[in-house]
Amino acid sequence: MYRFLGFICLMLWALDLSGQEPLSRYLRDGARRDHYISIPFQLIDGIAVTFLTLNGHPHQLFLVDTGSTDTLISKEAADIFHIPLILDSHSEFAASGKDVVSGKIAKKVRIDSGRFGIYSGPAPAISLSELTSYFAQPVVGILGFNVIRAHPTVIDFVSGTIGIFMPDAFEPRNSMNRIVLESCLRSPIINAEIQVGSTEYLSANLMIDTGTQVPLELYRPYVGKERLLKQDGLRQLELEGVGGRHLTSHGLAGSLRINNRKIKLTDVYLSQTSGGITDDTNVDGALGIPVLKDSQLVINCNEKYAIINEASN
């Protein structure tokens, strides 16, 4: 019931977006309002969701997932809205290191916010029936990192607004907390120092992942290399995510150091998966929503930096 009411509130918010411009402060002096797109979103059970228009059909539920390399739609939505698939096409997709799902490529996909275009082109079409079951409402797609990569983007968890800016129109007012992006090719990856359980601080490359409901998830071989799975007090569970389910251990406290900022973690997850969405052993883990939820997150792949500003900044 409460989840349903949350959807209704988000729908009303999306319809009443006019006049609400919480991210206009990121516009460079002299830039115009039409130099960025503003999209409202909400956290439902720790997952960022928004309503967008898909091929002319408004109010369709999308997940916002920076850990997903591609923007995609559900096979079910392609069937319902008669979006043609390339018959001999094949795509394999995994979000945040979860199980790989196969599908075809949708030929003509158009996603917009009702007033501004967001994405146009082909997109993977896979079954999202598990997510639809979880939300008790059709999930028609995932807004992935390829939308964000070409433009400076602000995900403001405080106001619940995403801003996608033209590169020449963007000006961060607070650049003190800039973090170098180690990679921006398939997902936003930063370097941090991690202390878990009784270990010393260890360096790790972390994916900034708005599709992860846990604060910090470390992948194997990083986990195996440091033998963190042998720590006492761990609990095993099956963790469900955008791309499927996988086994994980959790229950360890720890902390992160990013630049000079220290973030305490009450629960760290040690994954059984082999790598992140890039399937690259250089990706050691994912930084999730619980760490990001009180921040303004800036991702600027053009200048190769990210900013995670606390709400008070």
Image (tube, rainbow, N blue to C red):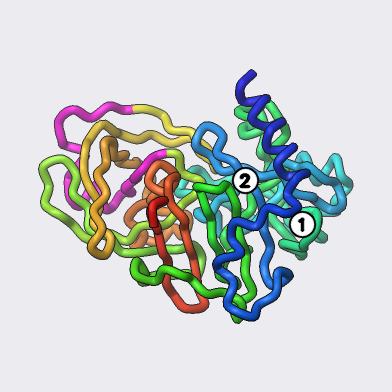
State the residue lying farthest toward the top. 1
Looking at the image, residue 211 sits to the left or right of residue 234; the answer is right
Left or right: 150 with respect to 116?
Answer: left
Q: Horizontal and vertical percent for residue 205?
A: 32, 61
Give the quarter of the image for residue 79.
top right
User: Magenta residues, as a range?
Assistant: 214-236
Query: Which residue is drawn at the image coordinates 58% and 52% (left, top)?
Result: 93
The alpha-carbon separation of the residues under discs 1 and 2 comes to: 14 Å
Identify the element where label 1 is drawn. Answer: strand
Q: Quadrant of residue 146?
A: bottom right
Q: Does 218 appear in magenta? A: yes
- Residue 227: where, in percent of width, then height? 17, 45
Task: Decide which of tag 1 and tag 2 comes sooner along the chain.
Answer: 2
For disc 2, the neighbor class at 10 Å (few under 14, some 14 to 19, many from 20) is many
- Asked whether 165 falls inside the magenta stretch, the response is no
Label 2 secondary element: loop
Q: Residues within 10 Å of mark 1 (few under 14, many from 20)?
A: many
Q: Which mark is residue 23?
A: none
Q: Is residue 263 left or right of residue 212?
A: left
Q: How many marks overall?
A: 2
Q: Which residue is mark 1?
A: 112
Asked whether the viewer can see residue 179, the reply is no
Residue 85: % across, % down: 81, 54
Q: Residue at x 61, y 22 (%)?
A: 2
The residue that label 2 is drawn on is 41
Marks 1 and 2 in Cβ contact (< 8 Å): no
Camera-side residue of 135 and 43: 43
Which tag is nearer the camera, tag 1 or tag 2?
Answer: 2
Q: Amino acid at mark 1?
A: Asp
Q: Quadrant of the N terminus?
A: top right
Is residue 12 shown above or below 277? above
What's under tag 2, amino acid-wise? Phe
